[in-house]
Image (cartoon, helix red, strand yellow):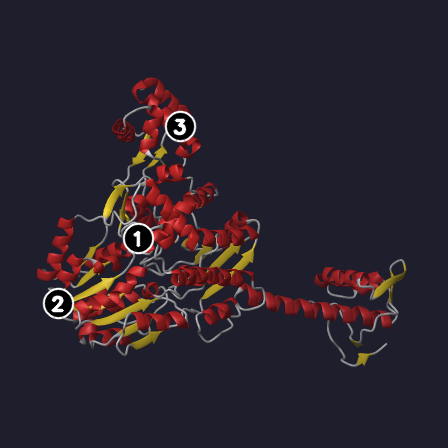
Amino acid sequence: MDKVYDLLSKHWGYHAFRPLQEAIIRTIIAGRDVLVFLPTGSGKSLCFQLPALCKEGLTLVVTPLIALMKDQVTQLAQRGVHAEAIFSGMSSVEIERRLDNCLYGNVKLLYVSPERLQTDLFKLRATTMSITTLVVDEAHCISQWGYDFRPSYLAIAHFKQTIPKANTVAFTATATKRVKQDIQNRLQLNKPLLFAQTFHRPNLIYWVRKTDHKDAQLLKALKQTAGPVIIYVNTRKKTETIANFLQKNGMTSVFYHAGLTTADRAIKQNLWTQNKVRIMVATAAFGMGIDKADVSLVVHLDLPASLEAYCQEAGRAGRNNVTAYAILWYDLQDIILLKQKCKESYPTIDQIRKVYQHLVNYYKIAVGSHAFVTYDFDLADFKQTTGLYTKEAYYGLKALELEGFIQLNEAYYQPSRVYFLLSREDLYAFQVHHPAYDWCIKGLLRLYGGTLFTPYCTIVEKKIAQFTQLAESKVQEQLHALHRLKVLEYFPQKATPQITFLTPRYLATDLPLPIHKIEQRNKTAYQQIESVIEYVTNDRRCRLAVLLDYFDENELVCNQCDICKSKVTRTIKDELITEGRNYVMHAIRQGKQDLKKIIEAVAPEKEKELLDVIRAMLDRKEIYYQYPGQLQISESSDISVPAVAVQRSGKGYVEKAKTPLVK
């Protein structure tokens, strides 16, 4: 048997490939550079995992998705393939051990983040490894025209000089023509062979509706469909709110977002993938690497930030080729919020300089000093001291990090969290019987109130300590004790948040920001949300045609989306109205002016429809009542109608002649 098919059967249990997979795999094995565009659910991972087993040496996989790294390493281990991953949060000892495994062990794939390629340690160790293939996943991240641009991807081309003999393989799901060219140029691909598969699947039906009653529409859709469901929303809190709402309405559901612990995410994901619960309510953090083919419905209750993200998420439905739906509900407020979020997420040059000025003032840093100096960082205190709004500070710092002026450690993005497990009544009883914890609990309630009873409230131990006049270590000690006593759940920060200045301090006015690049990135973001808004508000053009056009693919009309269906309905309705008007005008001309007799002459199921037509004709003054119940044609009416006769039948109006009668 062919080695490729032998390995496919042995490790994956398959005996045939999906479209394009085999050609891609054989091209990679041959050592060619490859650029691949495969939509979500097309079996992208297999395309680089299987060649890794066929080739000598190590396959290096660059991806920004830590969850995907972990999932794929686990899945490969279950298939008998040794893979490793290196990501943030690991100790230096653990990193060294995993790199040693790649050098001396039987590791076939190593997953790393793009930032890792820039470290001196990794560059040095890479020269000692036999890296034969470099895989760049989510390759659209290298393009400033893409929907998820990451500057760290720009370093990949330079890193390739460390492994000159390795071929480069780039994968992404969907990309515009401009982004495709940008990927090829920035990765310096050598005469790459291109493979592209349309994201269109005939079994996936797109549906968009404007509504002020999303909850009711959601329940209706869930009751009318069967099978696993994913519901996407934009905030962590909303995942919990919607999941609770569904449970109260008798539907099994769990929620998922990046703020959950790794263990919680795994539990919820397993419950859903094993069909123990039907509905997964999640943020965009859910879905990467999820191999579940029988999803029958993907719902968006909030507008996505781009059509690229939308197609990736919607594409998780119907991978088993059974009819599935991607439904998006929106209202006017959603459009306002999307524009507002875009404005907040992409600060202007002046806003970035403002945050930088506040930051250096906060640490009292002199001009020209403090390159590569690290400080403890308290976002809450920084905001309070500087007077910045939360989002203004957050996105300003993110922009400074993106441009390489500062670095924030992971703890900055994961503050401490608390959730009371007891009801208010039970909590009061606990305070009465355990006075040692009373002051800490009172401090929590005074500072954070009712949010403590909803999972999970972000807290700052330093702030609690100041309020209660307890030592911060004492506050942490009591929170841990209350956690053990099952009064609350306490998830402390993984480490103290820290901020590192990567350059000497500049005058804010002289901060060397790449103005053109930042302005272009902001412009691209606005163009992307405008494309989303245009897509959802469109009421004339096939949904699929709009999406295919956006991604520079040949347009198709699906005849299944809400737009296509409404066109058919409008056509039928227009034909029925025309037919009804013709019948009324002809009846009156033949001397049958009596309204009751006109109505009685048609099929019973057509009576209401004909009454509606007559009312419209009266409103437009095409006809009028000459006497009570007696209709007459208006003098101003210039309508020409065919001669028709009507009989009582299940088909309603039956056309007998086409000779026009002109008044």
Q: Identify the disc placed on residue 471.
A: none
Residue bearing mark 1: 405
Residue bearing mark 3: 445
Which residue sits at x=17%, y=67%? 162
Which residue sits at x=38%, y=37%? 385
- Sequence order check, earlier mark of 1 and 2: 2
Residue bearing mark 2: 130
Which residue sits at x=78%, y=70%? 583
- Sequence order check, earlier mark of 3 and 2: 2
Please determine whether, in this image, residue 282 is positioned above or below residue 651.
Answer: above
Q: CA distance from mark 1 to mark 3?
A: 38 Å
Amino acid type, callout 1: Phe
Amino acid type, callout 2: Ser
Q: Is residue 429 or residue 514 the one in the foreground?
A: 514
Say which of marks 1 and 2 sits in front: 1
Contact (Cβ within 8 Å) of mark 1 with mark 3: no
Q: Position of residue 325 (x, y in %)?
A: 47, 60
Please determine whether, in this image, residue 274 is positioned above or below residue 45.
Answer: above
Which residue, as the protein is rendered here, is positioned at the far left? 104
Amino acid type, callout 3: Leu
Q: Position of residue 272 (x, y in %)?
A: 35, 50
Please determine whether, in this image, residue 79 is positioned above or below residue 199.
Answer: above
Left or right for 266, reference 533 = left
Q: Quadrant of the C terminus?
A: bottom right
Which residue, as the protein is rendered here, is positioned at the far right? 627
Q: Position of residue 341 (x, y in %)?
A: 46, 51
- Sequence order check, earlier mark of 1 and 3: 1
Q: Quadrant of the N terminus?
A: bottom left
* Rendered image quadrant of residue 187: bottom left
Q: Position of residue 276 (x, y in %)?
A: 35, 48
Q: Is residue 533 or residue 615 the one in the foreground?
A: 533
